[in-house]
C-alpha cells in the first residue's frame, strides 16, 4: 500500500513517522551513575552536563539513523520532566530559592541544585510530593502553586537542547508537558487561599508558553509537541473551557512553530472536538490503550486537514505490535485527517532500551517482544508499508508477524487454570475482624503506637557483591546463605537496639520487591538489562509475566523464619501483592489482568500458608501500586477496585485469626482509594503520608475510616533525617482522627535505597517520637487494645 501527496492522490495526505519520546537513562545506566556521583560530590556540574549531552546526542542520532522522519528533543531530564517544567516556568516554592547560596560553591550548578532540592529535599527542606504519572509506574514531582505564584518563562532548556541537536545536523521537535496537564497535575500549596485551584493560573502559564514558542521559532524549530495526557481523565466543564482558551491563544501566537498536541493513555472524549477546532496543526491519539478514539474521530466527521499522529505501537508494554491490525487502523484514518504520522502510543520512556542486549531469555519469548529500539523499527516499518509497495516490506511484515506469534512453552498451564476455576470468589474468607483483633492482641502483646518499618533495609555494597557472586557461580550457595544470615543477625540486633516493636529481616536477599518474586514464579521471566526509570535515579527491571503463574517452592520462608529465630520480638514477613506484581511488570496481553492477578494471588496464598506454619505471625502484603492501575475515568473505578481488593483477599484468605495481615500502600491519591481500603480486609494498613504532609488525615476525616493504620511519618525518598519534633507533630495530626489503639508508627516505604548514615538516626528519632506521644496519652490508652486490628 502506497500513499503520497503526488499525482492523482493529491487529496490524500502524506505519511511519515516519529515517536513521542525515548528512554533517557543510557545503555549502561550512565545517567544514574553520573547523577548519583554529582550528589555525592565525586563529579562537578560540568561533568554531569557532559554526560547528559552525550546521552542526548546518542538518542537523537540513533532515532534519526533508524529512519524516523521526525525526532523529538527535550525529552531528557536529570530527574523528572514535570519538575523541569516547573523550573522552566518558575513554579519554584520560595523555600527552595535559598538553595542559591549553597549552590555558589565551585563545581555546583544553581539550576541543577534547585531541581534536586525540590526532588530530594536537603538542608532541612522536605522534598516535593511524588505521584504516579497517570496509570504508569513512572513517578513525577508534584508542582506546588498558590495565588502568589508568578508563572513566567524563566529558563532555556528546550531551546538549548534544540540548538544542541541542530549542531549535530538534526532539526528536532521540542517536547513539553502541556499547560493544561501541568496545572491539573499541580496541587495547591499549604498557604494557598481558600478556593484557589492551580487552573486559576492558566492565563499566566499560557503567556509563558507563548514566550517559549517565540524563542523556539527564532531558534529555528518548525514543530513543538505539547503533551496533554490529562485529557484522558474526566474533565469538568471549566477544564474543557480552559483547554479551548489555552490552545486558541497558543494557536494565535504569531511566527510560532506548528503545534502537535499529543494525548495518550486513553480516550479523550469531549476534548477531541475542542482540539479539532482551535487551530493546532496536529493531534496525537492513542489507538492502543484507546481504540475507541477511532470511532470518536469518525463520530465528529474527522479533523479536516489537521495532521493525525497515530499511536499504533504500544509504548507501555514489551510485546510486538500486531502490524496487520495496526495497518488496518490506518486505512480509515487516512480519510479522517490530513497527513498521517505513524507513532508510538506514548513516550517509550516506559519500556527498556534494547532487546538485543538480552542473552538469557528463551528464544520464543524474545521473538514475541520489542523494547524501545525495536518499537522504533516497528514504527518505521509501518510507515514504509503505507508509503511503499515493495516485496521487501511484505517480507518484513510477514517475518515480524511470525515472531509475534511464536509458540511459547508455559503460556498455558492447565493445572493453574483448573485451580483458579475451582476457587469460589475470594476464597474461604477470614473470621470477623473483631475476633481477629482480640486473638492478635493476645498473641502479639504489642504496646500502643507500635513501631515498625515497611520491610527493606539499606542494601550495602557487600550485600550486592555477595548476591552477584552467588548468581555468577563465584561462591557456593552455603557461603551465600551465611552472608545473608550474618546480615540478618546484624539487622535484628540493630532494630532491637533502636527499640522497634515489630522487626523485619531486612530483605538482603532481594534485588527488587517485584523481580525477586517473579524470578521464583513459573510463568515469569526476568531480564538482565531491561532497566526502566521509576523516578530520579531509581531504576527497576520489570519482570515479564508471559504465562500462567504458579509457585513451585517457598520464596521467603527460609529468611523470615531465620530472623524470627534470632529474637523474641515479632518479625514481620513481607510479600509483594498481586496487583503490584502486575502494575510493576510487563504483563501478557492475551487475557484479562484480573485473571492473571488471581493466579498470582493463589501463589501468594501458598506462601502465606508456609509462613504461618513456620511460626510467622505478622505478614505484610505490599500493594504500593494499587492506584497505578486505577482507570483514568471514574466510570471504571468500581469494577477495578472490586477485583483489586478481591485478589488481595484471595491471597490472604487462608490466614489464621492470630496471624496479623498488614497491607502497605504508597504513591497514591488516597482520596481516590481510601474508601476502598476497608475492602482489602487487612488487619493493619500502612500508607505513605510524610511526603504529602499528612494529607491522608484529611482523607480519613472525610471518609470516616477508623481502622488500624500506620500513616508514614518519615519520607524515605529524601536523604534528609527528619527530626523527633517533625515526626511527633505528624503523629499528633494522625491522632486527631485515629484512636491511639489503632495507630501504628512507621516510615512511608522501604529503606532499601537509603544509607545507614541516614536510616539509623531517622529510625531512632521515629521511636523517640512515638515514645513521647505514647507517654503523653491518658493512662487508659497506653496499653494494647483489642481494637488494634479493627
Image: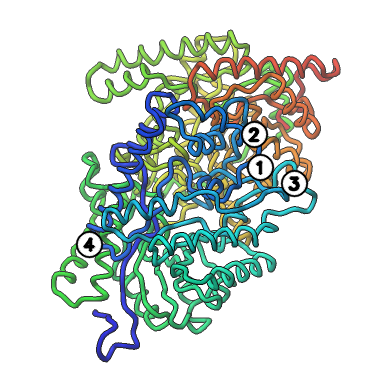
- Where residue 513 sits, quadrant-wise, is top left
**Image height of 406 relative to 771, above or below:** below
Among numbered discs 4 and 3, the one appearing first in the sequence: 3
Disc number placed over residue 677 in the picture, else none: 1
Inter-mark Cα distance, 3 to 2 = 30 Å
Mark 4 lies on a secondary structure that is helix
Which of the two marks, 4 or 3, is nearer to us in this view? Answer: 3
- Residue at 53% x, 82% y: name it: 300
- Residue with the mark numbered 3: 192
How packed mark 4 is, by other alpha carbons closer than 10 Å (few <14, some 14-19, many 20 or more), is some
Q: CA distance from mark 1 to mark 3?
A: 29 Å
Return the x and y of residue 150 as percentages of the image width and height: 66, 51
Give x and y (percent) for residue 141.
55, 43
Q: Quadrant of residue 15?
A: bottom left
| Above or below 397: residue 629 | above
Q: Disc 3, disc 2: CB below 8 Å?
A: no
**Residue 685, disc:** 2
**Mark 4 or mark 1, earlier in chain:** 4
N-terminal label among 2 and 1? 1
Q: CA distance from mark 4 to mark 2?
A: 47 Å
Q: Residues within 10 Å of mark 3 (few under 14, many from 20)?
A: some
Q: Find the distance from the CA under tag 4 to the CA under tag 1.
A: 44 Å
* x, y percent for residue 682: 64, 35
Crowding at mark 1 (Cα within 10 Å: few <14, some 14-19, many 20+): some
Per the image, the residue denoted by label 4 is 400
Secondary structure category for the residue under label 1: helix
Residue occupying the point 38% across, 30% down: 553
Helix, strand or loop at label 3? It is loop
> Closer to the observer: label 4 or label 1?
4
Whichever of callouts 1 and 3 sits on the residue coming sooner in the sequence is 3
Amino acid at each position: 500500500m502506497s500513499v503520497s501527496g503526488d499525482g492523482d492522490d493529491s487529496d490524500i495526505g502524506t505519511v511519515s513517522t516519529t515517536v513521542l519520546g525515548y528512554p533517557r537513562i543510557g545503555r549502561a545506566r550512565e545517567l544514574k551513575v553520573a547523577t548519583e556521583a554529582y550528589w555525592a560530590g565525586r563529579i562537578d556540574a560540568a561533568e554531569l552536563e557532559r554526560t547528559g549531552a552525550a546521552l542526548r546526542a546518542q538518542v537523537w542520532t540513533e532515532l534519526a539513523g533508524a529512519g524516523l522522519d521526525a525526532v523529538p528533543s527535550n525529552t531528557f531530564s536529570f530527574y523528572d520532566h514535570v519538575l523541569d517544567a516547573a523550573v522552566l516556568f518558575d513554579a519554584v516554592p520560595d523555600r527552595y530559592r535559598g538553595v542559591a547560596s549553597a549552590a555558589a560553591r565551585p563545581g555546583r550548578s544553581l539550576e541543577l541544585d534547585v531541581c534536586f532540592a525540590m526532588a530530594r529535599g536537603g538542608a532541612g527542606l522536605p522534598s516535593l510530593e511524588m505521584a504516579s504519572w497517570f496509570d504508569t509506574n513512572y513517578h513525577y514531582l508534584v508542582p506546588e502553586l498558590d495565588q502568589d505564584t508568578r508563572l513566567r518563562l524563566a529558563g532555556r532548556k528546550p531551546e538549548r537542547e534544540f540548538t544542541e541537536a541542530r549542531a549535530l545536523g538534526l532539526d528536532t521537535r521540542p517536547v513539553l508537558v502541556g499547560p493544561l496537564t501541568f496545572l491539573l497535575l499541580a496541587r495547591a500549596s499549604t498557604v494557598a487561599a481558600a478556593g484557589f485551584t492551580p487552573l486559576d493560573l492558566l492565563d499566566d502559564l499560557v503567556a509563558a508558553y507563548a514566550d517559549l514558542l517565540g524563542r523556539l521559532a527564532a531558534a529555528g524549530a518548525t514543530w513543538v509537541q505539547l503533551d496533554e495526557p490529562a485529557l484522558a481523565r474526566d474533565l469538568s466543564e471549566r477544564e474543557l473551557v480552559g483547554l479551548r482558551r489555552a490552545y486558541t491563544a497558543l494557536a494565535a501566537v504569531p511566527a510560532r512553530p506548528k503545534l502537535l498536541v499529543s494525548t495518550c493513555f486513553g480516550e479523550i472524549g469531549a476534548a477531541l472536538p475542542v482540539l479539532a477546532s482551535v487551530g493546532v496543526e496536529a493531534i496525537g491519539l492513542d489507538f492502543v490503550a484507546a481504540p475507541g478514539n477511532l470511532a470518536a474521530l469518525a463520530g465528529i466527521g474527522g479533523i479536516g486537514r489537521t495532521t493525525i499522529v497515530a499511536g499504533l505501537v504500544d509504548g507501555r508494554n514489551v510485546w510486538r505490535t500486531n502490524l496487520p491490525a495496526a495497518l488496518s487502523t490506518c486505512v480509515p484514518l487516512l480519510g479522517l485527517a490530513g497527513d498521517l504520522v505513524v507513532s508510538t502510543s506514548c513516550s517509550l520512556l516506559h519500556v527498556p532500551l534494547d532487546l538485543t542486549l538480552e542473552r538469557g531469555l528463551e528464544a520464543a519469548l524474545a521473538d514475541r517482544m520489542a523494547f524501545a529500539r525495536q518499537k522504533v523499527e516497528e514504527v518505521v516499518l509501518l510507515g514504509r508499508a503505507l508509503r511503499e509497495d515493495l516485496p521487501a516490506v511484505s517480507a518484513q511484515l510477514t517475518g515480524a508477524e511470525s515472531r509475534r506469534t511464536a509458540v511459547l512453552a508455559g503460556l498455558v498451564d492447565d493445572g493453574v487454570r483448573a485451580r483458579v476455576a475451582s476457587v469460589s470468589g475470594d476464597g474461604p474468607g477470614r473470621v470477623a475482624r473483631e475476633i481477629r483483633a482480640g486473638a492478635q492482641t493476645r498473641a502479639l502483646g504489642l504496646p500502643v503506637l507500635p513501631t515498625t518499618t515497611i520491610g527493606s533495609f539499606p542494601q550495602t555494597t557487600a550485600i550486592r557483591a555477595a548476591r552477584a557472586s552467588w548468581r555468577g557461580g563465584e561462591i557456593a550457595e552455603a557461603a551465600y546463605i551465611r552472608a545473608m544470615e550474618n546480615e540478618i543477625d546484624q539487622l535484628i540486633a540493630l532494630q532491637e537496639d533502636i527499640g522497634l516493636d515489630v522487626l523485619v529481616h531486612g530483605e538482603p536477599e532481594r534485588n527488587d520487591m517485584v523481580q525477586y518474586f517473579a524470578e521464583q514464579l513459573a510463568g515469569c521471566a526476568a531480564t538482565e538489562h531491561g532497566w526502566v526509570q521509576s523516578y530520579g535515579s531509581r531504576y527497576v527491571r520489570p519482570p515479564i509475566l508471559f504465562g500462567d503463574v504458579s509457585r513451585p517452592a517457598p520464596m521467603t520462608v527460609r529468611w523470615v523464619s531465620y530472623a524470627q529465630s534470632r529474637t523474641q520480638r515479632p518479625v514481620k514477613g513481607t510479600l509483594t501483592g498481586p496487583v503490584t506484581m502486575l502494575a510493576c511488570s510487563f504483563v501478557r496481553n492475551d487475557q484479562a489482568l484480573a485473571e492473571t492477578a488471581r493466579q498470582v494471588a493463589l501463589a501468594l496464598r501458598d506462601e502465606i500458608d508456609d509462613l504461618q506454619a513456620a511460626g510467622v505471625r505478622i505478614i505484610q502484603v505490599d500493594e504500593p501500586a494499587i492506584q497505578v492501575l486505577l482507570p483514568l475515568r471514574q466510570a471504571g473505578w468500581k469494577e477495578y477496585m472490586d477485583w483489586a481488593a478481591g485478589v488481595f483477599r484471595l491471597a490472604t484468605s487462608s490466614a489464621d485469626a492470630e496471624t496479623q495481615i498488614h497491607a502497605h500502600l504508597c504513591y497514591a491519591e488516597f482520596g481516590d482509594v481510601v474508601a476502598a481500603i476497608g475492602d482489602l480486609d487487612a488487619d493493619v494498613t500502612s500508607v505513605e503520608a510524610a511526603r504529602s504532609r499528612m494529607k491522608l488525615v484529611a482523607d480519613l476525616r472525610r471518609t470516616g475510616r477508623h481502622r488500624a493504620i500506620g500513616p508514614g511519618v518519615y519520607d524515605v525518598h529524601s536523604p534528609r533525617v527528619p527530626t523527633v519534633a517533625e515526626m511527633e507533630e505528624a503523629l499528633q495530626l494522625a491522632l486527631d482522627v485515629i484512636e491511639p489503639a489503632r495507630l501504628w508508627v512507621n516510615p512511608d516505604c522501604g529503606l532499601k535505597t537509603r544509607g545507614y548514615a541516614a536510616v539509623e538516626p531517622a529510625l531512632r528519632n521515629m521511636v523517640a517520637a512515638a515514645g513521647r506521644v505514647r507517654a503523653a496519652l491518658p493512662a487508659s490508652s497506653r496499653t494494647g487494645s483489642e481494637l488494634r486490628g479493627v
